[in-house]
Image (cartoon, rainbow, N blue to C red):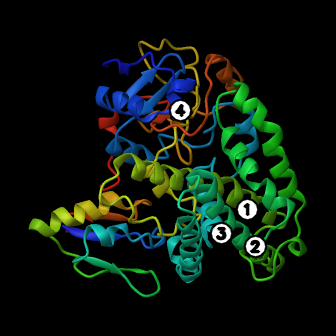
Amino acid sequence: MTAPAESDIDIWDDDVLVDPYPTYATLREQAGVVYLPKNDVYVLTRYDIIRDVLADPATFSSTALGFNPMVNEALQGTSLASDPPLHTRLRATLSENLTPRALRGLKATIDEKADKLVAELAARGSFEAVDSLARAFPLEIVADLIGFSGPVKDNMLRWGQAAMQVIGPMNHRTQEAFPIAGELYGWCSSVTADDLAPGSIGRGIFDAETRGDIPEGSAGHIIHQYLGAGVDTTSASIGNIVALFGATRSSSSSSGSTRSSSPQPSPRCCATGPRCTSGAARPSGRSRSTERRFRQAPSWASFSAPATATHGTTRIPTPSTSRATRSTTCPSATGRTAAPARAWQSSRPTPSSTPSPAG
Amino acid sequence: MRIELDRPRCEGHGLCEEAAPLLMHLDDDGELVIDVPKVDGTDLDAAKAAVRVCPVAALRLAER
């Protein structure tokens, strides 16, 4: 078997994080799958390979998608860190209110708010696009949807950012984010229906729990996932769009600025602005040069990594005890999770062997 | 080739309609309607683009 391409890039280096796209382009040009020894991850760089892997959860499991054992422990059993059929069920509950179809009814309201905000900002002549638009808009929408206000709203941006940051490798950024992410978790654990505005989606989730449509005690958990997934990703998306408009300054630079963006943690975001995740699992007991059969499922921001050997007869379990070694494999990484290329660990990093979702 | 829809997967993103507006559309409820299920020639290219762009892999092309 041919060894995959390698690169000495540190995907979590500060210089890469500040402006990741040239690095992503370099990796993409190099190969569809690139191994990064400094991070001990495989990066998927091209659309078709990413699609194939996402469509193959039997080979590329999502059960341990974070880059540190603490977050993987915390995410156990959530829609983010599960495979079908469990994932299918959890995602259905989570996305019930957030699919484009469900949001159609909210489109007029969201468009109205977007137009109002853009008109206010445009009237100023100049404004800080990230704070005043990219962060302000999704916060406003999500706060109304979930039905919270006051101090919770004041904290939501830092909470949402921390909820994403803790998925990274255990470096100083991740360590600093854990207590902040804990504040969000704490609020979601204690929030009650009365804390949320009548008629809001958040209130509706509690109603569903009361009716027995979702398991008892799961309402706060679902709200946590809305907030953890919806705010930071949407801010990043809007911010990037504005940055791209600014960078290109073409005739299209002003169009689209009034379009609304709904706070939905959908795979579409991942497909167009993939986040780098990746388990940094070590191939236990096997030489990396001979056979890459990992015990650890790697990672995606929202999907999969290999939990099984590609040839279906040998299903490899993913022992949680082996994960503890992972964070030590990249002690110098400065990782944020908002990286670009897909990374994962494969038992067989041979993308051509994976089936296409198109059949 | 035939366009097949895995309806429970479809979330109504509508990207397929943008890729192949002559072959499929979202109705007023956001449900996908395949207007031209059997495709060949230039329609096939559009159908492939629709399959490829679906963010939840709800579409596929079958032999017949």
- From the top left corner, tell me how far across and down residue B38 is, in percent: 19, 74
Q: Secondary structure at mark 2?
A: helix
Q: Are marks 4 and 2 in contact (CB under 8 Å)?
A: no
Q: What distance separates the C-alpha of mark 3 from that of mark 2?
A: 17 Å
Mark 4 crowdedness (10 Å alpha carbons): few <14, some 14-19, many ≥20: few
Real-space CA distance between mark 3 and mark 4, rounded to the nearest whole angstrom = 27 Å
- Say which amino acid is labelled 2: Ile
Q: What chain does badge 3 belong to?
A: A
Q: Which label was assigned to residue A222?
A: 1
Crowding near the residue tagged with mark 3, few <14, some 14–19, many ≥20 C-alpha atoms within 10 Å: some
CB-based contact (under 8 Å), mark 2 and mark 1: yes
> Which type of secondary structure does the marked residue at label 1 adopt?
helix
Horizontal relation, residue A283 to residue A253: left or right: right
Q: What residue sits right under mark 3 in the picture?
A: A141
CA–CA distance between discs 4 and 1? 32 Å
The C terminus of chain A: image quadrant: bottom left
